Amino acid sequence: MPIWCLFSVARQPQSDAMTLLAPQTAATVTADGHVDVHLDGRPVRLHPQWLREQSTEPGQIEATNRQRLFTPIDFPPDLRAVAAELEGDTLTVTFTDDHRCSLSATVLTQRLGWVPDPEAPPAPIAWDPDNLPFPTVSWPTIAGQLDEPGVAEATVQFLGDFARHGFVIIRDTPQVEGTVETVANHIGYISGNNFGWVFDVRNEPKPTDLAYTAIELKAHTDQPYRKSQPGLQLLHCLANGAQGGDSLLVDGFAATETLRRERPDLHEVLATVPVDFRYDMGSDVVVDTGPMIELDANGQFRQMRYNTKLDLPIPVDGADLDGWYEGRRWLSAWMDDPAHQAVFRLDPGDLMFMDNHRVLHGRTEFDPTSGHRHLQGCYIEHDGPDTRYRLALRQLGTQPA
């Protein structure tokens, strides 16, 4: 007796411009058990196991978390499709293990990577201060549950701005210690390290990091020496009465893309030469190795590790150290140019939320004898805001324009 399944997932409404499928297209099974079909007007050959593993029939997945209940060895190694039919948006396939299921052709098209993920946050936009809208949000507008009036809309705008620009200033937060942890756990999931779950940024007599001094800090990313560099940083201003101590932000995405365009040879060197990033104060040591510019499988910007107080290129065979030092100098000069820096002052109650894989931050020198300056910080990872953005979209029941 054939086993039936229905492949159904939550799907956002599609605009006319995103119509994916012709009303009806034939599907055929090849001699080796693959499925030939037209999706979005384009021919594609689909692997039988790839199709089989997308079955969502009860017994194939756990109903609550939708994770598979089967393993790769539960299928015969020669699993093949024996019949296939496409009608409207439904592709029905029968396999040699007598399993038969109906799959959404629209979802298959998305999983082939032919159309963008409709719930994904917006793509990054390179910025400089002259074209930057300087995104801000008021904390009370996003602090509630997503089903409360206005919260989902404000959250989509807030996290959409964050995805585009790599930072948002959250205004109107309580001016009390521990607020940064509350905000972090609302947006995502706080993560700790040797500096603690929450750390205090203020002038210290025996600083464990240069951030805990009053000196100028050039634009940098935090903790490039970790196996997983902290993803997102939150810095909450409790007091800022000292002279100096203005904050600055620089778009590392804009910097590296400009370098790629103007000096592709130097961009290539910084994306390939391994670097030893090392934090070592004797009683504590953290070390990792990786390139200054990390690209994804398609050669696109993924993240940046940039902290000239902590880096040392590794002279492996063939490493172009002349090019590496020239490239780092180019980036340093570009990011130290006021034309590329957003400089502003955090007021008590302001919280700077930034992507530590993309946006570099720093501050001007301040005089600790002229007043009190105290920030609290912590880290979360990219998953939390990504999840909250998607859930906010589902709450609204629409896709962003």
Image (cartoon, grey):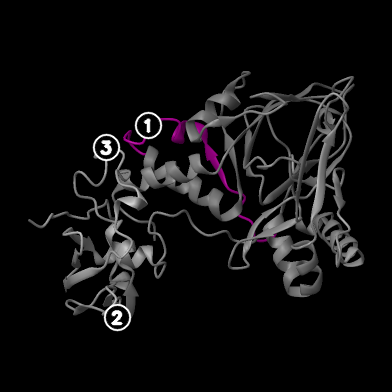
Q: Earlier in the sequence, mark 2 or mark 3?
A: 2
Q: Which residue is mark 1?
A: 145
Which of the 4 quarters of the picture holds residue 116?
A: bottom left
- From the top left corner, tell me how far across and down residue 254 is, in percent: 69, 61
Residue at left offset 74%, top offset 62%: 271
Q: Which residue is mark 2?
A: 41
Amino acid beneath label 1:
Gln
In the image, residue 31 sits, relative to residue 298, either above or below, namely below
* Proximity of marks 3 and 1: CB atoms separated by less than 8 Å: no
Amino acid beneath label 2:
Gly
Q: Is residue 129 visible?
A: no
Q: Residue 227 versus residue 189: which sits nearer the camera?
A: 227
Residue most extreme to the left:
1
Q: Residue 3 versus residue 277: which sits nearer the camera?
A: 3
Residue 320, numbered label: none
- Residue 174 within the magenta-colored segment of the rendering: no
- From the top left corner, tell me how far across and down residue 363 is, in percent: 80, 40
